[in-house]
Amino acid sequence: MALVLAMDVSSSVNAEEDALQRGGLAAALMAPDVQAAFFASPDPVALAAFEWSGRYNQQDLLGWTLIETPADLATAAARIGGSTRSHNDFPTAMGYALGHAAVRLQDAPACLFRTIDMAGDGENNDGFGPEEAYAAFAFDGVTVNGLVVNAGEYEAEVNLIAYYEAQVLHGPGAFLEIANGFENYAAAMERKLIRELGAMVLGGAPAGASGG
């Protein structure tokens, strides 16, 4: 599997929330059940990660890294957890983020599965949206799963689950995971990674997955 992790750092995410999601992603990668999922298949996972906000504000956190050993996974998690935020005052350009992820997949090692993990706390509000991204970039055979941070502070957040279900989920076996606030980010990401990585073992969509 080639797996791209995309983390929202738009202006709606404050410094404390960013620390929770950045550390939460690193902690999820190191969770025992996630580690077991990474190595349940004889085929390795190629992992990459970036943060995104405005239309021209995507910053790579982890280049393509082949996760063949627990040490590889620990190094990747440490790099993500120790990274610093590149932008904090830009809007939510989800279409551009999806385009960036699609381009990154073009440089990935050859893999049977190609998955993008889109996490965010708001709807697209800058530039083209997910529908236009899916039409303009190479998404054939690519699964886009979503992680909604359901804070519910603004109208865009209240409707965010429905937005992700209708606009963001894409491809075979796409599904949505929900974090009830940034405090729940690590636990939600752990559940999500286990489900995504299960596709390699099952040889298809994760059990119970809903189409996008």
Image (tube, helix red, strand yellow):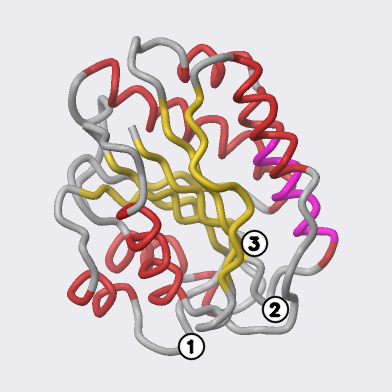
Task: Using the image as rendered, state which of residue 33 and residue 187 is in the foreground.
Answer: 33
Residue beneath the point at 27% across and 48% down: 143
Type of secondary structure dominating the magenta stretch: helix
Say which amino acid is labelled 1. Answer: Asp
Residue 42 falls left or right of residue 184: left
Q: Which residues are magenta?
A: 16-26
Q: Which mark is residue 126?
A: 1
Q: Is residue 17 magenta?
A: yes
Q: Is residue 186 magenta?
A: no
Residue 134 location (% of width, % of height): 23, 69
Task: Using the image as rendered, state which of residue 141 and residue 27 is in the foreground.
Answer: 141
Residue 138 location (% of width, % of height): 21, 63
Label 3 residue SS: loop
Say which amino acid is labelled 2. Answer: Ser
Pick whichever of labels 1 and 3 is earlier in the sequence.
1
Residue beneath the point at 70% across and 78% down: 11
Position of 158 relative to 127 (above/below): above
Position of 52 relative to 178 (above/below): below
Say which amino acid is labelled 3. Answer: Ala
Q: Which residue is mark 2?
A: 11
Residue neighbourhood size for the residue with mark 2, other residues' Cα within 10 Å, grouped as few (<14), some (14–19), many (≥20): some
Q: Which mark is residue 151?
A: 3
> Among all residues in the image, which is located at the extreme right?
16
Residue 39 location (% of width, % of height): 46, 13
Q: Nearer the viewer, mark 1 or mark 3?
A: 1
Residue beneath the point at 42% across and 76% down: 96
